[in-house]
Image (spheres, rainbow, N blue to C red):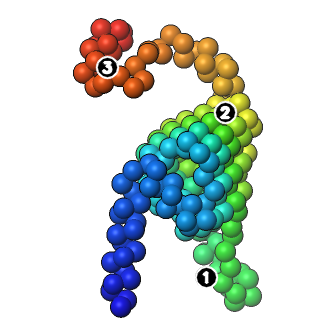
Amino acid sequence: MKMLKKIIRRFKFYYANRSMPTKAEYLRKQGAKIGKGTRLNCSTTAFGSEPYLIEVGEMSYFSAGVQLFTHDGGVMTLNNMGFFDGKEMDKMGRIKIGNNVYIGTNAMVLPDVTIGDNCVIGAGAIVTKNIPSGSVAAGVPAKVICSVEEYGKRAKSKIYPTMGMPFLEKKKFLMENVK
């Protein structure tokens, strides 16, 4: 019976990671709050062992390799030192991500962090503090580097109308237009 339960659990995990909608559905069943239209290009393991402590708004996008941490594993060292009078303790915190937030490849969000609406988090960023709405944040640790409006103005020279184009049409367009 144990083996059957293990096989079923692995199948559910494998199935959940097959598409963006099945990832969101799987994580909602684990207690995560994920808004409509949010796209998860990361694995369900990105939501850690306490997905029920994570809330994501609508129309957000998570790139590959994104990780959300609701706990601080460093407390294990303190536990091993008997720091808490012999009790095994955990340090936990919620994560809240607003609407229309893009989180770049391999970014990490740590416990007790809120990312406001309409934000961009750069690839590889480690978000240790709250990020206000309308901000672009990057770096280790992540810092606000500009507003989304400033980012939009800077990006205009490199924006192309290729979203949703078939592969070959997009390739042809970009080969002719990207300098």
Q: Which mark is residue 170?
A: 3
The answer to whether the residue labelled 3 contacts the one labelled 1, judged by CB atoms less than 8 Å apart, is: no
Q: CA distance from mark 1 to mark 2?
A: 42 Å
Residue holding disc 2: 118
Task: Give the crowd class for mark 3: few <14, some 14-19, many >=20 residues within 10 Å.
Answer: some
Q: x and y percent of residue 49 in the render?
A: 55, 68
Residue drawn at x 33%, y 78% as measured from the top left: 7
Q: Secondary structure at mark 3?
A: helix
**Which of the two residues, 85 or 160, is positioned nearer the viewer here?**
160
- The answer to which image quadrant residue 30 occupies is bottom right
Q: x and y percent of residue 70 in the render?
A: 63, 62
Residue 54 visible within the image:
yes
Of the residues tagged 1 and 2, which is closer to the observer? 2
Q: Secondary structure at mark 2?
A: loop
Residue drawn at x 47%, y 42% as measured from the top left: 63
The answer to whether the residue labelled 2 contacts the one labelled 3, judged by CB atoms less than 8 Å apart, is: no
Q: Secondary structure at mark 1?
A: helix
Quarter of the rendering occupied by the C terminus: top left
Image height of 85 relative to 55, above or below: below
Residue holding disc 1: 80
Residue drawn at x 71%, y 81% as measured from the top left: 83
Q: Amino acid at mark 1?
A: Asn
Quarter of the rendering occupied by the N terminus: bottom left
